[in-house]
């Protein structure tokens, strides 16, 4: 869940938690860190003036040994005085004068470590049972918030994704298309959109069955995704109908991309004993289009022309 987005409202609550922990434990620093593959990121910290960490700072794991150890082992760590323990005497906290450390892991629902909640002090400190209970309670609160965020993210992904192919569904594609249209209108940028339809797909379902037809759609999508660029948006907008947004792309470049894929599909076997081809209508944004629906309608008309002219071609 490295891509889990933490909303500003949640970060604000975590800021309050850090302040409460620091005040209750009488320490100058309480910090919430997020684990990355090679670093620990400071995402919230108490607002005491002597806080040694900077918000959004990423500290290499080789340096942030204490919180790194907690996140890696998913075990609490208590160091009354780092200078008296050779294992931690050269950690970053100790080098910054924070010789006391107590940290607990923050665990995601799948069992992996999100990061840590920790407190530090420039003086030796014996932590009390009440302090550890409070920190543990706040850690569980943060974990509950993470679980809710994870579920929210999963529900959102389900709402915008086509169940069969895993690409954008019709609703999400149209949202992306409308945003791209408005961006082009405001900033006078260019983009192209294509409507794509598999040729004679009904024959596939009739001859091989709908399950095999679904497999063809999945294979088609997988190959298409490998052809397009990161910035492009591919969506399934009907049974065997797809649409593609190509930002900052002129018509010749967009047609070349589609022609390459058309040729690839024509030479491939998406199903045994039957060749699959597709037709497409391709159009470039122009300021003369008053609304996004008109632009999409033009691409649809060009798709129909490609079908009428014999299929397995791109009209623009």
Image (cartoon, grey):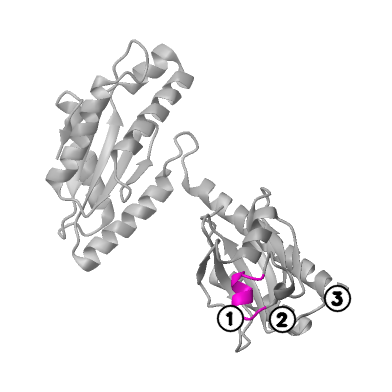
In the shown orientation, is residue 70 left or right of residue 1?
Answer: right
> Which x, y percent locates residue 313?
18, 29
Q: Nearer the viewer, residue 17 or 69?
A: 69
- In magenta segment, residue 126: no
Marking on residue 71? none
In the rendered image of this protein, does residue 55 appear above or below residue 248?
A: below
> Which x, y percent locates residue 227?
29, 37
Residue 267: quarter of image:
top left
Question: How far is mark 2 from mark 3, CA to CA?
Answer: 14 Å
Query: Of callouts 1 and 2, which one flags the residue occurring earlier in the amino acid sequence?
Result: 2
Marking on residue 22? 2
In the shown orientation, is residue 163 left or right of residue 224?
Answer: right
Q: Name the residue under label 3.
A: 128
Answer whether labels 1 and 3 touch (C-beta < 8 Å). Answer: no
Q: Which of 29 and 278 is in front in this view?
A: 29
In the rendered image of this protein, does residue 210 appear above or below residue 120?
A: above
């Amino acid at each position: 869940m490295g891509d889990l987005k933490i909303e500003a409202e949640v970060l604000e609550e975590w800021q309050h938690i850090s302040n409460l922990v620091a005040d209750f434990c009488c320490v100058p620093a309480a910090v919430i860190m997020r684990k990355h593959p090679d670093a620990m990121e400071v995402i919230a910290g108490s607002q005491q003036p002597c806080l040694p960490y900077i918000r959004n700072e990423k500290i290499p794991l080789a340096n942030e040994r204490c919180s790194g150890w907690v996140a890696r082992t998913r075990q609490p760590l208590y160091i009354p005085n780092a200078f008296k323990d050779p294992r931690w005497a050269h950690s970053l906290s100790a080098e910054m004068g924070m010789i006391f450390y107590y940290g607990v892991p923050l665990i995601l629902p799948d069992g992996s470590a999100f990061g840590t909640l920790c407190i530090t002090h420039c003086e030796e400190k014996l932590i009390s049972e009440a302090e550890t209970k409070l920190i543990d309670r706040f850690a569980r609160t943060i974990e509950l918030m993470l679980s809710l965020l994870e579920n929210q993210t999963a529900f959102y992904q389900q709402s915008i994704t086509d169940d069969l192919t895993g690409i954008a569904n019709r609703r999400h594609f149209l949202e992306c298309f409308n945003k791209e249209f408005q961006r082009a209108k405001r900033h006078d940028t260019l983009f192209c959109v294509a409507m794509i339809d598999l040729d004679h797909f009904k024959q596939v379902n009739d001859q091989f069955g709908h399950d095999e037809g679904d497999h063809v759609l999945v294979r088609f999508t997988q190959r298409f995704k490998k052809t397009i660029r990161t910035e492009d948006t591919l969506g399934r907008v009907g049974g065997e109908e797809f649409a593609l947004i190509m930002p900052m792309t002129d018509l010749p470049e967009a047609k070349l991309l589609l022609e390459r894929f058309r040729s690839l599909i024509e030479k491939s076997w998406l199903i045994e004993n039957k060749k699959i081809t597709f037709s497409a209508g391709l159009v470039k944004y122009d300021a003369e289009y008053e609304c996004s629906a008109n632009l999409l309608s033009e691409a649809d008309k060009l798709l129909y022309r490609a079908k009428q002219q014999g299929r397995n071609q791109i009209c623009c």
